[in-house]
Amino acid sequence: MSTLIQHVSVIYHDRIEPNCYVLFEACIQEIGSMAQVPACDHVIDGTGLLLSPGFIDIHTHGCGGKDTMDGEAAVRHMASLVVRGGTTSFLPTTVAATPADLHAALTGVRAVQTQASKGANVLGAHVEGPFLAAPYKGAHEEALLLNPNYAIIEPFADVVRV
Protein backbone atom coordinates (compact mmCIF):
# COMPACT_ATOMS: atom_id res chain seq x y z
CA MET A 1 0.00 0.00 0.00
CA SER A 2 1.45 3.35 -1.04
CA THR A 3 1.56 6.32 1.30
CA LEU A 4 1.86 9.97 0.36
CA ILE A 5 3.25 12.66 2.67
CA GLN A 6 2.09 16.03 1.38
CA HIS A 7 2.98 19.67 2.09
CA VAL A 8 6.34 18.68 3.61
CA SER A 9 9.69 20.46 3.24
CA VAL A 10 12.27 17.98 1.91
CA ILE A 11 15.90 18.34 2.98
CA TYR A 12 18.40 17.66 0.19
CA HIS A 13 22.19 17.80 0.53
CA ASP A 14 22.29 21.35 -0.82
CA ARG A 15 18.87 22.84 -0.15
CA ILE A 16 15.46 22.58 1.47
CA GLU A 17 12.61 22.28 -1.01
CA PRO A 18 9.31 23.52 0.51
CA ASN A 19 5.79 22.25 -0.17
CA CYS A 20 6.63 18.85 -1.61
CA TYR A 21 5.06 15.43 -1.59
CA VAL A 22 6.84 12.13 -0.99
CA LEU A 23 5.29 8.92 -2.26
CA PHE A 24 6.57 5.68 -0.77
CA GLU A 25 5.85 2.00 -0.35
CA ALA A 26 8.62 0.20 1.57
CA CYS A 27 10.98 2.80 0.01
CA ILE A 28 10.64 6.22 -1.60
CA GLN A 29 9.05 5.99 -5.05
CA GLU A 30 8.78 9.65 -5.97
CA ILE A 31 9.39 13.17 -4.63
CA GLY A 32 7.77 16.14 -6.30
CA SER A 33 6.10 19.51 -6.10
CA MET A 34 2.59 19.83 -4.70
CA ALA A 35 1.62 21.25 -8.11
CA GLN A 36 1.57 17.67 -9.50
CA VAL A 37 0.43 15.34 -6.70
CA PRO A 38 -0.36 11.74 -7.66
CA ALA A 39 -3.51 10.09 -6.33
CA CYS A 40 -3.01 7.97 -3.24
CA ASP A 41 -5.32 6.23 -0.76
CA HIS A 42 -3.22 6.89 2.35
CA VAL A 43 -2.19 10.55 2.82
CA ILE A 44 -0.27 12.13 5.68
CA ASP A 45 -0.27 15.91 6.10
CA GLY A 46 3.29 17.14 6.61
CA THR A 47 2.46 20.83 6.83
CA GLY A 48 5.15 22.61 8.85
CA LEU A 49 7.38 19.51 8.99
CA LEU A 50 10.81 18.70 7.57
CA LEU A 51 11.64 15.36 5.97
CA SER A 52 15.29 14.36 5.85
CA PRO A 53 17.28 11.30 4.88
CA GLY A 54 17.97 8.91 7.73
CA PHE A 55 21.06 9.52 9.83
CA ILE A 56 24.01 7.11 9.92
CA ASP A 57 25.79 6.93 13.28
CA ILE A 58 29.32 5.57 12.87
CA HIS A 59 30.21 5.52 16.60
CA THR A 60 27.67 4.22 19.11
CA HIS A 61 28.92 2.45 22.24
CA GLY A 62 25.43 2.05 23.64
CA CYS A 63 22.11 3.57 24.56
CA GLY A 64 19.08 2.85 26.69
CA GLY A 65 21.24 1.22 29.35
CA LYS A 66 22.69 -1.30 26.86
CA ASP A 67 26.24 -1.57 25.53
CA THR A 68 27.68 -3.12 22.36
CA MET A 69 29.97 -5.24 24.53
CA ASP A 70 26.91 -6.99 26.01
CA GLY A 71 26.20 -8.83 22.75
CA GLU A 72 23.27 -9.57 20.48
CA ALA A 73 20.33 -8.70 22.74
CA ALA A 74 21.94 -5.38 23.67
CA VAL A 75 22.69 -4.47 20.03
CA ARG A 76 19.14 -5.44 19.01
CA HIS A 77 17.80 -3.16 21.78
CA MET A 78 20.09 -0.34 20.63
CA ALA A 79 18.78 -0.72 17.06
CA SER A 80 15.21 -0.36 18.31
CA LEU A 81 16.04 2.86 20.17
CA VAL A 82 18.34 4.81 17.84
CA VAL A 83 15.79 4.67 15.02
CA ARG A 84 13.41 6.80 17.11
CA GLY A 85 15.75 9.78 16.68
CA GLY A 86 16.08 9.38 12.92
CA THR A 87 19.12 7.10 12.80
CA THR A 88 18.42 4.49 10.14
CA SER A 89 21.83 2.77 10.20
CA PHE A 90 24.64 2.57 12.73
CA LEU A 91 27.92 0.96 13.74
CA PRO A 92 27.83 -0.52 17.25
CA THR A 93 31.20 0.37 18.76
CA THR A 94 33.39 -1.81 20.96
CA VAL A 95 35.89 -0.81 23.62
CA ALA A 96 39.31 -2.27 24.36
CA ALA A 97 38.65 -5.72 25.81
CA THR A 98 40.08 -9.19 25.94
CA PRO A 99 40.08 -11.04 22.61
CA ALA A 100 37.37 -13.37 23.95
CA ASP A 101 35.13 -10.46 24.98
CA LEU A 102 35.67 -8.72 21.63
CA HIS A 103 34.81 -11.92 19.78
CA ALA A 104 31.61 -12.29 21.80
CA ALA A 105 30.59 -8.67 21.16
CA LEU A 106 31.35 -8.90 17.43
CA THR A 107 29.42 -12.16 17.18
CA GLY A 108 26.41 -10.34 18.64
CA VAL A 109 26.82 -7.42 16.24
CA ARG A 110 27.06 -9.83 13.30
CA ALA A 111 23.91 -11.69 14.39
CA VAL A 112 21.88 -8.47 14.39
CA GLN A 113 23.46 -7.36 11.11
CA THR A 114 22.52 -10.57 9.30
CA GLN A 115 19.07 -11.20 10.77
CA ALA A 116 15.97 -9.10 10.26
CA SER A 117 15.32 -6.80 13.18
CA LYS A 118 13.00 -3.96 14.01
CA GLY A 119 14.84 -0.69 14.12
CA ALA A 120 17.98 0.72 12.56
CA ASN A 121 20.22 -1.32 10.28
CA VAL A 122 23.53 -2.53 11.67
CA LEU A 123 26.11 -1.83 8.96
CA GLY A 124 29.00 -3.56 10.72
CA ALA A 125 31.05 -2.76 13.80
CA HIS A 126 33.35 0.08 14.79
CA VAL A 127 36.14 -1.80 16.59
CA GLU A 128 37.72 0.76 18.89
CA GLY A 129 40.69 -0.98 20.41
CA PRO A 130 42.47 -2.93 21.74
CA PHE A 131 45.18 -1.67 19.35
CA LEU A 132 45.57 1.82 20.77
CA ALA A 133 48.62 3.72 21.99
CA ALA A 134 48.43 4.36 25.73
CA PRO A 135 48.82 8.18 25.42
CA TYR A 136 45.74 8.21 23.13
CA LYS A 137 43.61 5.63 24.91
CA GLY A 138 40.91 8.02 26.04
CA ALA A 139 38.52 6.16 28.35
CA HIS A 140 39.84 2.70 27.40
CA GLU A 141 41.33 0.58 30.16
CA GLU A 142 45.11 0.67 29.70
CA ALA A 143 45.61 -2.90 30.90
CA LEU A 144 43.55 -4.11 27.90
CA LEU A 145 45.58 -2.30 25.23
CA LEU A 146 47.61 -4.50 22.89
CA ASN A 147 50.23 -4.05 20.22
CA PRO A 148 48.87 -4.77 16.73
CA ASN A 149 49.06 -8.46 15.98
CA TYR A 150 47.29 -10.30 13.16
CA ALA A 151 47.12 -13.52 15.20
CA ILE A 152 44.84 -11.71 17.65
CA ILE A 153 42.41 -10.40 15.03
CA GLU A 154 42.40 -13.43 12.71
CA PRO A 155 39.66 -15.24 14.72
CA PHE A 156 37.41 -12.18 14.19
CA ALA A 157 37.53 -12.53 10.39
CA ASP A 158 34.49 -14.81 10.25
CA VAL A 159 32.32 -12.50 12.35
CA VAL A 160 33.24 -9.23 10.63
CA ARG A 161 33.40 -10.40 7.01
CA VAL A 162 30.81 -8.75 4.78
Image (cartoon, helix red, strand yellow):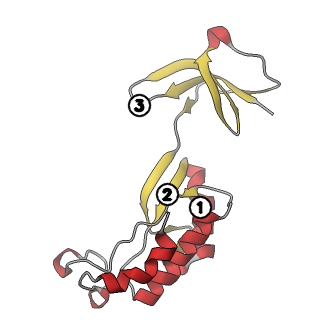
Badge 1 marks a residue whose secondary structure is helix
The amino acid beneath tag 3 is His
Which residue is disc 3 drawn over?
Answer: 13
**Mark 1 and mark 3 residues within 8 Å of each other at the beta carbon:** no
Circle 3 — which element? loop
Q: Position of residue 99 (x, y in %)?
A: 41, 87
Quarter of the image where one finds residue 73:
bottom right
In the current view of this chain or complex, which residue is farthest to the left?
Answer: 135
Residue bearing the label numbered 1 = 79
Residue on which the image places disc 2: 90
Looking at the rendering, which quadrant does residue 1 occupy?
A: top right
Give the spatial CA distance, label 1 vs label 3: 25 Å
Whether residue 67 appears in this view of the structure is yes
Q: Are the residues flagged by discs 1 and 2 in contact, CB closer than 8 Å?
A: yes
Q: In the picture shown, does residue 12 fall above or below 124?
A: above
Left or right, 144 with reference to 60:
left
Residue 68 visible somewhere in the drawing: no
Residue 98 in the image, given as x and y percentages of width and height: 39, 89
> CA–CA distance between discs 2 and 3?
20 Å
x 46%, y 28%: residue: 12
Q: Quick one: label 2, few (<14), some, or many (20+) residues within 10 Å?
A: many
CA distance separating discs 1 and 2? 8 Å
Residue 12 is marked as none
